[in-house]
Image (cartoon, helix red, strand yellow):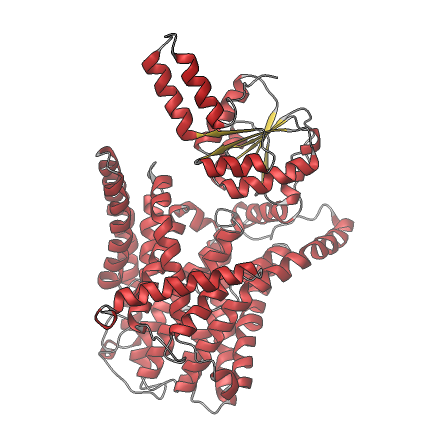
Amino acid sequence: MPHDTPLIATIVAGLGLAFVFGALANRFRIPPLVGYLVAGVLVGPNTPGFVADASLANELAEIGVILLMFGVGLHFSLKDLLSVRAIAVPGAIVQIGFATLLGIGLAWMLGWSMGAGVVFGLALSVASTVVLLRALQERRLIETERGRIAVGWLIVEDLAMVLALVLLPALAGVLGGQEQADVHSSGLLSLPASYGIWGVVGITLAKVAAFVVVMLVVGRRVIPWILHYVAHTGSRELFRLSVLAIALGVAFGAAKLFGVSLALGAFFAGMIMSESELSHRAAEESLPLRDAFSVLFFVSVGMLFDPLSLISNGLPILATLAIIVIGKSLAAFVIVVAFGYPLATALMISASLAQIGEFSFILAELGVGLKLLPEQGRDLILAGAILSIVLNPLMFLVIDWMKPWLEARAARTAAPAETKPVGPATEPGQVASVASTFQKEDGPPPKTTLTGHAILIGYGRVGGLVGTALKEAALPFLVIEDADKTLAKLKADNIETVAGNAANAEVFAAANPEGARRLILAIPNAFEAGQIVLRARAANPNINVVARAHSDAEVEHLKGLGADTVIMGEREIARGIVEEVLGNHAGQKPVRDAMAEGAGAAPIALQS
């Protein structure tokens, strides 16, 4: 019966309503996450009808955070993380400090104590992991320098909040709250106040350092070994299970043994696993669960929201929202510009961080439990989280609208001083090089001088083989790619590239589709490939388009949009098997012809 299965009821109601309202939101060109939040409000305790189990929803959402940070770690390396430390560390610290001061100011205006102001300000200073990563993934920015800065910033905020969560119980009596030695931060760490402030700080930092050392020394050997061992068993089920077990196990162990947050533990597990050759497959296997549980995160946030609070606390909510969206974003903007990065980059980082989420809720609950934060403060934090999450996609749209104007203004300003370096004067070996990369990314890429060439979209497992064949055949071609590691490899191989997403009009135009002879879509995403096909046909009706697909539906979709040849991987594998089995027998040709006809067209020859 439903009342005997709260977990099943929560998952079914959460995902079911999230799908319905997410689809409606998408239909009206609203970000689907708004629909997920509405679904959470409807199954929450503040609206009539079915009420899901809030505690179960929160735990399910935590799994989504773990898997999402694990996925980000799979695309990172320690070198990537250290490369942005010069801006991520001071940037996060300045933003946290500025937002906390603004929160203290609002708390003073509302008549709260200093302790309430500190907790309130800290809760408003830390961005949501899920929202930030979702925004970066949708714009394919995770593997760019801008994405690395945002993620590095997030990691510093995460560490700062872990420290705040263990310090608050020790400082509760000093700040005017109820001193409780046994209160700890959602199971992360339990340190008695008798250790003193510096003792708590020292032990916390020592535990975090111990976790990092264990992951770098032990995890770097054990995790890749486990993956390779399981891969050699040939069982896809076991491989998928090993990926999930490592992600969740390391995150939980890090939280219980070392006092590190679940999200940070999962990030390090993914970062260590990224050194394995199987990291790409690991990312693919964990993707469906990451998406499902991240949806439950938004549902769980919606469940906490009381719509009536918008009326009872109207002005304080607006002030809270202003601190989140304007105040702390302004601090991020100033620090990024101060380091010499372009305005468009500073705006992108600011928009990414202009929201709050899971750590804010933990801080709010801890503050209320310690008698530091009034319940009104928790309500304001929840309302600020909901509204900032809803507004976050709109901020990116505003930035996209402002970007051409900012670029034109920056070009006019820089014109009289062309010899002035783009990057900052400090740390030229690191930050300056990153800044110059950002300058390249924020402006339209230069247009190629190639004509009669092939445009190869994507240089992964398939695209790499195609590129090698084109190079050996001495055919002119260029590659459009957005993964930094792959771009570095292409540069080392002296292959002309356009950095970015081919679905972007400026990026695709830089490949000179008007003068190209052939477009080869080696990316696995048929829907994104379809957008590129339409753009190519509009630019050059005579261009020959070759694409890949994984199903008959994708074949029909791409051919319907104008692709000349669509090659389905499964059919090509079957064709290879048929050739091997039948050899040159007389009966081979009809089989091959039938398969080619089913595939839509035979593979195109690499000829000039």
Quadrant of the image containing the N terminus = bottom left
Quadrant of the image containing the C terminus = top right
Q: Nearer the viewer, residue 102 or 497?
A: 497
Residue 359 image offset from top left, x and y in percent:
38, 69
Residue at 59% over, 38% down: 561
- Is residue 37 in view from this perspective? yes
- Residue 566, placed above or below residue 426: above
Name the residue at the bottom extreme.
111
Residue at 40% over, 51% down: 72
Q: Is residue 364 left or right of residue 105?
A: left
Residue at 45% over, 35% down: 552
Q: Is residue 154 left or right of residue 242?
A: right
- Residue 24, placed above or below residue 365: above
Q: Nearer the viewer, residue 145 or 234?
A: 234
- Residue 173, placed above or below residue 241: below
- Is residue 69 in view from this perspective? no
Residue 153 image offset from top left, x and y in percent:
46, 59
Q: Image quarter for residue 337?
A: bottom right
Q: Image quarter for residue 379?
A: bottom left
Residue at 34% over, 75% down: 51
Q: Is residue 108 left or right of residue 179?
A: right
Q: Nearer the viewer, residue 337 or 273?
A: 273
- Residue 223, placed above or below residue 354: above
Residue 306 image offset from top left, x and y in percent:
44, 80
Q: Nearer the viewer, residue 391 or 496?
A: 391
